[in-house]
Amino acid sequence: MVGKLTKFEKDWDTENVLNLIEKLRIVSNETTVKRDKLFDENVIKFLFSNEKETKIFVHYTKDEGIARKIFEEGFKFVDSFEKTAEQIINDTVDLTYKHNIRKYYGKYIIVICISNNIYDHYDNEIKKLNKHFAQVEQMLTEIPPCFNDNQDEVFTLSKRFIKGYVNYETGVIELNRGFNPNFNSEKFNQNLERVRSAN
């Protein structure tokens, strides 16, 4: 617009200027600039309060109903956990980069925390099995995997690992009362046995 103004301003009459002002007024009324609250102190504290003891992952969604459903049912993912969840660390540059890539998926950030002890235990067990197709998050499910319409295997990470979610536009945080990053279930060991016996 600045380029157009400087190029054509000598040819403009009052009507051209008034038309431009009207267009700018309409645009400013329709567009609301939303401040990102991800880096507010309380949100950062929520994200990283247990950073030394856990691995922290985030997943973005547009629908608050889906965020609440994840509280109730666990986090569903197809084949690979990393396709829809991103590990984060308490580093401003790293968090800014990952947030800017994923924020267009929705304003609700699901926060997933898994104790380092639990994560490392199942990671080591998988390495002993030498089963390269298996992932730690696939072991941390209480519900047996199923197949969707595309014949992709669907896993459900236990709802106990869901810390909560935050609306990064408003800074409102919702905590999951059932959150327990140290949760360990006999079903996790059963999942390992299933992998062990797989060809």
Image: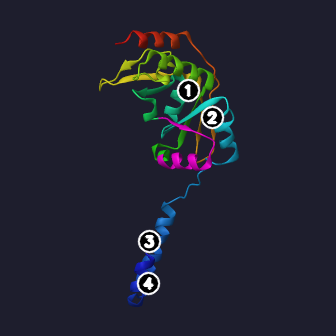
Circle on res. 71: 1
Seen from the viewer's position, the closer of residues 5 and 189 is 189
Query: Which callout, 4 or 3, points at the residue further toward the start of the chain?
Result: 4
Q: CA distance from mark 2 to mark 4?
A: 50 Å
Residue at the spot x=30%, y=23% of the render?
A: 151
**Could you tell me if the residues under marks 3 and 1 are in contact, i.e. CB atoms within 8 Å?**
no
The amino acid pointed to by label 3 is: Lys
Pointer 2: what residue? 174
Q: Residues within 10 Å of mark 4 (few under 14, many from 20)?
A: few
Query: Which callout, 2 or 4, points at the residue further toward the start of the chain?
Result: 4
**Could you tell me if the residues under marks 4 and 1 are in contact, i.e. CB atoms within 8 Å?**
no
The amino acid pointed to by label 4 is: Thr
The amino acid pointed to by label 1 is: Phe
Q: How many marks?
A: 4
**Chain part drawn in magenta:** 85-101
> Residue 129 placed where, x, y %?
45, 15
Quadrant of the image for the N terminus? Answer: bottom left
SS assignment at label 2? strand
